[in-house]
Image (tube, helix red, strand yellow):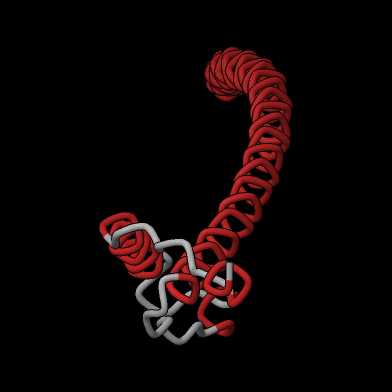
Amino acid sequence: MRACCAQAQDESVDIESAYLRELQGQKEELVSKVGALKADLSDWRRRLDANVTGYKAEVSKLRAELGYEVDALKAEFLELKAALRQQLEVTAALAQASGARAPPRRAAAVDSPPPGGGLRLLRRAFRLEAQAAAMPPPEPQQTDRGASQ
């Protein structure tokens, strides 16, 4: 009976050791997979960091370019505003010189454009300029000295 029990124990030990070897093999496979996943994750993070750095640099460059363009547009707008003011003053002076009633100048409209934008104001200025150009030139006025001689 002892031989039978000893043989059963040997078979049990063989089964357990085979099971342990199988588990050890699975553990090594899993450790290997986890190591590969860690390496993939690390590589992905490096690529992501490189992309983020590149995008940050690009956004910074675009922001600087946009700021430059906005400043240029502001300067251009101020120049346009000054030219428009000058045109309105010339139009008013021409209208006064010709004896016609000068259109009322709304300084607030020049200082702050209407809600529809400055396009309406520009159209009005061009219309006034065209009207002033269409008016006949003022005739020279005779002075009293010219009449007495």
Instruction: Pick the residue in front: 50 or 106.
Output: 106
Q: Residue at x 54, y 20 (%)?
A: 19
- How many marks overall? 0
Which of the image's four quarters has the C terminus?
A: bottom right
Image coordinates of residue 12 in percent, x first then y, are 56, 23
Which of the 4 image quadrants contains residue 116? bottom left
Residue 5, placed above or below residue 138 = above
Residue reaching furthest front?
149
Instruction: Pick the residue in front: 8 or 48.
Output: 48
* Horizontal arrangement in the rendering, residue 148 relative to residue 91 (left or right): right
* Horizontal arrangement in the rendering, residue 2 relative to residue 15 (left or right): right
Instruction: Pick the residue in front: 29 or 65.
Output: 65
Which of the 4 image quadrants contains residue 14? top right
Instruction: Pick the residue in front: 66 or 139.
Output: 139
Residue 142, placed above or below residue 37 = below
Q: Residue at x 31, y 62 (%)?
A: 123
Is residue 1 at all visible to an observer of this figure?
Answer: no
* Horizontal arrangement in the rendering, residue 23 relative to residue 92 (left or right): right
Image coordinates of residue 95 in percent, x first then y, are 43, 72
Which of the image's four quarters has the N terminus?
A: top right
Image coordinates of residue 122 in percent, x first then y, are 39, 61
* Horizontal arrangement in the rendering, residue 62 relative to residue 121 (left or right): right
Is residue 137 at all visible to an observer of this figure?
Answer: yes
Residue 20, placed above or below residue 121 = above
Q: Residue at x 41, y 71 (%)?
A: 98
Image coordinates of residue 10 in percent, x first then y, are 60, 15
Q: Residue at x 53, y 19 (%)?
A: 15
